[in-house]
Image (spheres, rainbow, N blue to C red):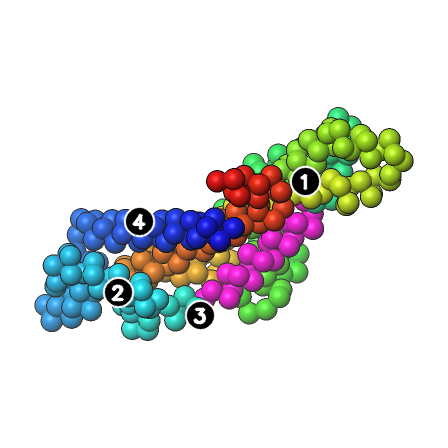
Amino acid sequence: MKKYIAKRILLLVFLLFAVSTMIFFFLHFIPGDPAAGILGDGASAEDMARIRSELNLDKPVGQQYLVYNKNLLNLSFGKSIFNNKPVSRNILTHLPNTLYLAAAAMILALLISFPLGAAAAFKENTPVDTIVTFVTSAGLAIPTFFLGPLLIILFSVKLGLLPVSGSEGFKYLILPALTLGTAMCAFLTRIIRVSIGMELKKPYVLLARAKGLSETRIFFKHLLKNAMIPIVTTLGLQMGALLTGAIVTETIFSWQGIGVLLITSINRRDYPMIQGLIVFITSIYLIINLLVDLTYFFLDPRIRHEIKET
């Protein structure tokens, strides 16, 4: 177990190093002068020199790379050009809103997808299954950038029930969470339906039914744990996707999370913020995948046996 965890952590560190290096060289070799992009073409030579100094652009690329890695190790990511505050502080200021939105979207998706997926699996090839399949297909077909404005028009403009944009309270969370959670709910419902449906056809379920066990007991005591492995995989990947997908949703609803911060930083040419945010989002995604792999270890005895043998 310890060797397995150590290998996964080493792989995570290597991937983070590779991603951070790629981001650094990608941004530094884009044509154009970052200082001119930040200040504009009409800026004075003194201001241009100051910005180049703050961004370490007046140093050789190798030295810039060393400074960049030093900032990463200190978890400061340098300072924002726009407000001169540490990048890490800007991220931590906006992160809670993104976490609230992602958690709300995840909870909403789970509350809807589990009953729908289970019902479709137990009622396979019936009108219930057909309706669930149709609804999930519609949910997957509607893109976030279309659904968000549609919900604003319906619930904010026409009905006047919810605010159009902002992040000041629970009312402001409803529409962004619904927008972000819809596609995830549709995809998760399908995974749950397929996973539970496959388990229902296995011999141990038939044996449990032959013993006279109720469907409820079969589901919760025997079937659910085995069906959870692909579901956990999907949840882990979707949680990472929520953080990246939140960029579009946050922009539509002016929800002040790291998605809005990233778009704003790109528009302002705030290179330290862009680098820090991309590395941070990648780190979250990789950590979630690591946690999913560790969850496999506890859910599936076969994986524990394979790891012990290796």
Number of residues whose C-alpha sits closer than 10 Å to that of mark 1, classed few (under 14), some (14–19) or many (20 or more): some
Q: Which residues are magenta?
A: 94-113
Task: Check if residue 97 falls in the magenta segment.
Answer: yes
Instruction: Please give the name of the residue rendered at 75% of the width and 41% of the height, measured from the top-left corner.
Output: 222
Residue 180 vertical position relative to residue 42 in the rendered view, above or below? above
Label 1 or label 4, whichever lies nearer to me, is 1
Residue labelled with disc 4: 18
Question: Residue 52's spot in the image, x, y percent?
Answer: 16, 65
Tell which circle, 3 or 4, labels the residue nearer the N-terminal end: 4
Task: Give the Cα separation between the discs numbered 3 and 2.
Answer: 22 Å
Residue linked to disc 2 = 70
Lower sequence index among marks 1 and 2: 2
Relative to 61, is 85 on the left or the right? right
Amino acid type at circle 3 is Thr
Whole-percent x and y of residue 60?
A: 12, 59
- With 226 as the anchor, is 21 left or right in this view? left
Residue 127 magenta? no
Q: How crowded is the residue under tag 4: few (<14 C-alpha within 10 Å), some, or many (20+)?
A: few
Above or below: residue 272 compared with residue 286:
below
For the residue pair 99 and 222, the one nearer the viewer reads as 222
Residue 93 is labelled as 3
Mark 2 residue element: helix
Residue occupying image coordinates x 15% and y 61%: 63
Who comes first in sequence, dot 1 or dot 3? 3
Q: Quadrant of residue 120?
A: top right
Q: Which mark is residue 10?
A: none
Helix, strand or loop status at disc 3: helix
Q: Quadrant of residue 215?
A: top right
- Say which amino acid is labelled 2: Lys
Residue that badge 1 annotates:
226
Task: Using the rendered image of the protein, determine whether residue 153 is visible from the camera's viewpoint.
Answer: no
The alpha-carbon separation of the residues under discs 4 and 2 comes to 15 Å
